[in-house]
Image: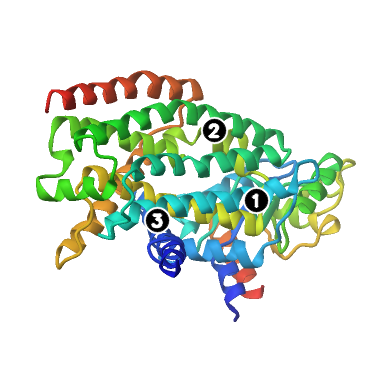
Amino acid sequence: MAINIFYFLVFPGLLFAAVAGGFLSWFDRKITARVQFRKGPPLLQPFYDFFKLLLVKETILPKQGSPIVFLAAPVFAVFGATMAGVFILLPLFNITTGFRGDLIVIFYLLTIPSFSYIIGSLASGNPLAAVGGSREMKLILSYELTFLLFTAGIIMKAGQQFDLYGIIKAQQEISPYIGSISGILLFIVGIFCVQAKLALVPFDIPEAEAEITEGIFIEYSGAAYALIKLAKYIMLFVLPSLIVAVLMGGFRLDGINILWSILKVLGVVLLLTLIRNTNPRIKIKQAVSFFLIWMNLLAIAALVLIAFGY
Amino acid sequence: MSFKSHCFKKSLWVFHFGGASCNNCDIEILDCLTPRHDLERFGILLVGSIRHADVLLVNGSINNHDRERLIEIYKQAPKPVLVVAIGACGCTGGIFADSYVFAGPVDKIIPVDAYIPGCPPKPEAIIAGIVKLVQKS
């Protein structure tokens, strides 16, 4: 029991994932700045932002909405992100949970933050937040089937295995799945799903700054917004870790391999950042057809290739 | 210097309120965020919603229409919020001071923490003003 609470709160759960995600958020902002020939923020900037929001700023409750739901939504978002983080990071750090169906659970837990954002935005009573919430709903509807096919592809590739620990071990014994044609297709699909789950630029439709001024987060201030930032930091660490776990052979924790493990995560985040910096925001219609037609076709092609053993 | 105020000074998020402006000050404010001056080095970001803002930048002359909106925006901001009046119009009224629709310089309507005069002020002047604001608060 005590060890489970330790897993959830300290390592690899809340504290570790939040610190790692904070550094990844700094990395993302620094790369963005370098792409635009700027200098970029200092290393501790995400932590300054978080503690400023948490400790200094006032939290304003909506007058027309429902304050309890409005305040509960960020807590649920942090909870969902941390839970998914624990399930993904425990096998990555070579700790077996003994739970044989965890890939399915991870799939469900990863949607909790997005759903919490929708609930929170609809509880705020702001029309722009409602627009953002409806956009986020459409975005979830479009990428979720693709993400399911991505998960199915991983499970098929691992020989009908639902166990993340087993999948990582199987890759470390033979070779990472990304080394095959179907693996590359799954990687492309997975990267775009992660991009949409993190709401980074081609798919930042729900929080479009220019049109609907942060959309779903428009009414959040102070500590509640700090929790949303925390959930975003955790997701920025957890989702690239999932890609590393299921396609790139996971982490190895001996000697020089620690460096490779860190570089794998940084590489995935670098790819996400470069996609975000070289693309404009698309319309929700384009996002839906992008996922429902093109990404699904790619994922089904990968599934067929896996069935034939490529 | 306490931990709280240190975090606050290192991460000022700016919301930009343009009154009846001639847009010169707006362009100079945007210049601060471009690669040459890059205020993100100091953690300064331009945010879209007043609920996330720590600094309220006000420029342009405030006329009778803007007055109510400025008060509304100021009330919506989560405290503590710093107010900066930019440009001759924001500080004193400039050439519009005698106009019949002029509702007073910014400090007549809401409390102002820093004034950055100029028509328009250079980006360097805006950065110098922000530095003085950070040192004061």
**Vertical arrangement, residue A91 with respect to residue A65, above or below:** below
Q: How much space separates mark 3 and mark 1, taking CA atoms?
A: 21 Å
Q: List the residue tagged with mark 1.
A: A72
Element at badge 3?
helix
Q: Which mark is residue B88?
A: none
Q: List the residue tagged with mark 3.
A: A86
Residue at image position (57%, 56%) is A227
Q: List the residue tagged with mark 2.
A: A136
> Residue A280's quadrant in the figure?
top left
**Do badges 1 and 2 share one subunit?**
yes
Task: Tell me which label, 1 or 2, sits earlier in the chain.
Answer: 1
Task: Tell me which label, 3 or 1, sits earlier in the chain.
Answer: 1
**Do badges 3 and 2 share one subunit?**
yes
| Left or right of residue B73, residue A139 in this image | left
Element at badge 1?
helix
Quadrant showing the C terminus of chain A: top left
Quadrant showing the N terminus of chain A: bottom left
What is the x, y in percent for residue A295?
33, 24
The chain letter under disc 2 is: A
**Vertical arrangement, residue A33 with respect to residue A215, above or below:** below
Say whether marks 3 and 2 touch (CB < 8 Å).
Answer: no
| Left or right of residue A57, residue A161 in this image | left
